[in-house]
Image: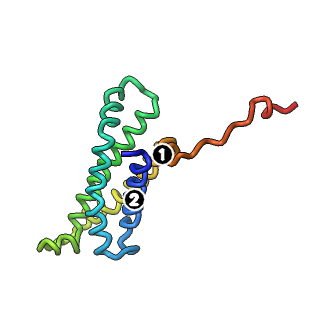
Amino acid sequence: MSARTRLWLDIGMFAALLAAYNPVWTGLPVHEWLSIAVIVPLLFHLIINWEWTLRITSTFLDRLFHASRLNLVVDALLFVSSVAVMLSGLMVSQVVAGAFGAAATPTAIWVAMHAVTADTTIVLLIAHFALHASWVTRALGVRPAPSAPREALVDR
């Protein structure tokens, strides 16, 4: 799969998660079903990036201050946060649970956990994209602007 295709998949998932972030924006049924639908592309994202994850994990302790260590920490936190927001979302579900004949009675703890982990997931997604900004620009084919010669930067 090309980098550009992977990037569009990532952008699509990010847009879906942003749309699903607040049920007021889309309504509760779209919020819940869109959140369920994004699970498959998220799993696909994990699978196609699994080799990178293993490679970075194996060198985690060797590179104490390397950027890939920060990437791994953010990615691991993003995974935990995503699982927590999905689990808590299922526990407070009204539409999806009803479609399967279950009646959910959301407790305050599950509602609070869902709200906090949703906020955390969005912040970590933004950090994830920021940490992978150079890959995004390469995938888009954006070339960095040429830098001015060093002599042009020195006042004479």
Horizontal placement of 34 versus 18: left or right?
left
Residue 124 visible from this viewpoint: no
Which residue, as the protein is rendered here, is positioned at the far top? 62
> Between marks 2 and 1, how big is the CA–CA gap?
15 Å
Instruction: Identify whether 11 is placed above or below 2.
Output: below
- Mark 2 vs mark 1, foreground winner is 1
Disc 1 element: helix
Neighbor class of circle 1 (other Cα within 10 Å; few <14, some 14-19, many 20+) is some
Please report whichever mark, 2 or 1, sits nearer to the chain's N-terminal start.
2
- The image position of residue 147, as x and y in percent, is 69, 37
Q: Is 110 or 73 nearer to us in this picture?
A: 73
At horizontal 28% and vertical 69% (from top left) the residue drawn is: 32
At horizontal 42% and vertical 26% (from top left) the residue drawn is: 64
Kind of residue indicated by mark 1: Ala
Disc 2 element: helix
- The image position of residue 107, as x and y in percent, is 22, 68
Neighbor class of circle 2 (other Cα within 10 Å; few <14, some 14-19, many 20+) is some
Residue that mark 1 sits on: 139
Residue that mark 2 sits on: 12
Kind of residue indicated by mark 2: Gly
- The image position of residue 149, as x and y in percent, is 75, 32
